[in-house]
């Protein structure tokens, strides 16, 4: 193994949550008078912390979202997760291989700790991630594309950034990993390869990842 730590994004990489959450986000923004398609949501917000939604809407419209926006959005998303969420195909197999090989891993997500835990309980991924392996944008001042979250995860795991590899599926996440001085493998299952052009490697099937990491 050429890396001492594998840092996974969560949404879209470990849990198949992006279609669910972006459908709900687009619908809620539209409901509030900010017409947004599913494609718009993927383009603008996939991989981002919630503050990006607020910041972009304020920048574009001069209007602030309601104070209860985050709470209502998350309640809708969590309810949908409980009904529909599944792990990304092949993700469990990758985690099994890393565990058998004794390769350290963790996750660093733009989502809140609550969102991560709700998704992991539903999908059974909680058996692979204890609290010491989970890092959220809540833990740092800035979310992706700033490198802060990945640097925080590496520091807490005791590994130098240049010895880490990040697994990401969003342009914002790829930019954050590159800014952190880490290699990054871009997962193209939902994102066109050209939008992840800064990645060290690209792959379209999670089953391929274990071989890429060797």
Image: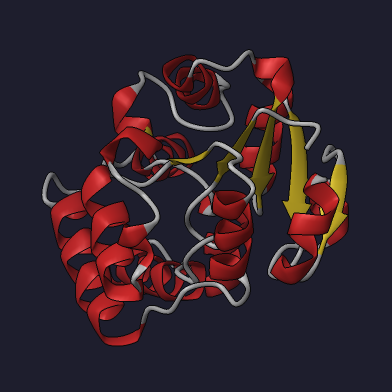
What percent of the width, then of the height, locates residue 75? Answer: 16, 66
Residue drawn at 73 percent across, 31 percent down = 3
Please give left or right for residue 153 compared with residue 114 in the image: right
Q: Is residue 33 visible?
A: no
Residue placed most toward the observer, 83 or 156: 156
Q: Would residue 175 be found to the left or right of residue 147 on screen?
A: right
Give the quadrant of residue 120. Answer: bottom left
Which of 32/159 is in front? 159
| Up-down relation of residue 146 to residue 39 (above or below) | above
Q: How is the image coloured?
A: secondary structure
Compared to 209, does 16 lie above or below?
below
Image point (29%, 31%), residue name = 138
Q: Give the vertical position of 43 relative to 15 (above or below).
A: above
Residue 27 placement: quadrant: bottom left
Q: What residue do we see at 48% from left, 53% from top?
A: 10
Residue at 50% across, 72% down: 16
Q: Quadrant of the N terminus?
A: top right
Residue 1 in view, yes or no: yes
Q: Residue furthest bottom?
A: 83
Q: How many marks?
A: 0
Looking at the image, residue 207 lies above or below residue 113: below
Frontmost residue, 133 versus 203:
133
Pick whichever, 85 or 214, lies toward us. 214
Q: If the image is split into quadrants, where does the C terminus sit?
A: top right
- Percent across and percent down for residue 172 are 63, 40
Residue 162 position, x and y percent, is 73, 17
Residue 203 placed where, x, y %? 83, 60
């Amino acid at each position: 193994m050429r890396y001492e730590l594998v840092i996974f994004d969560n949404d879209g990489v470990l849990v198949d949550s992006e279609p669910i959450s972006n459908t709900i986000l687009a619908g809620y923004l539209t409901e509030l008078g900010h017409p947004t398609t599913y494609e718009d949501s993927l383009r603008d917000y996939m991989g981002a912390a919630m503050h990006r939604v607020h910041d972009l809407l304020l920048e574009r419209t001069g209007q602030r979202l309601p104070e209860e926006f985050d709470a209502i959005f998350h309640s809708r998303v969590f309810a949908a997760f409980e009904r529909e969420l599944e792990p990304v195909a092949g993700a469990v197999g990758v985690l099994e291989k890393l565990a058998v090989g004794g390769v350290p891993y963790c996750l660093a997500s733009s989502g809140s700790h609550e969102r991560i835990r709700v998704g992991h309980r539903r999908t059974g991924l909680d058996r692979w991630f204890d609290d010491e392996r989970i890092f959220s944008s809540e833990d740092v001042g800035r979310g992706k594309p700033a490198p802060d979250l990945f640097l925080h995860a590496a520091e807490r795991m005791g590994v130098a950034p240049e010895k880490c590899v990040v697994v990401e599926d969003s342009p914002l996440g790829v930019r954050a990993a590159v800014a952190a001085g880490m290699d990054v493998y871009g997962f193209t299952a939902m994102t066109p390869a050209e939008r992840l052009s800064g990645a060290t490697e690209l792959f379209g099937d999670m089953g391929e990842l274990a071989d890429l990491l060797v």
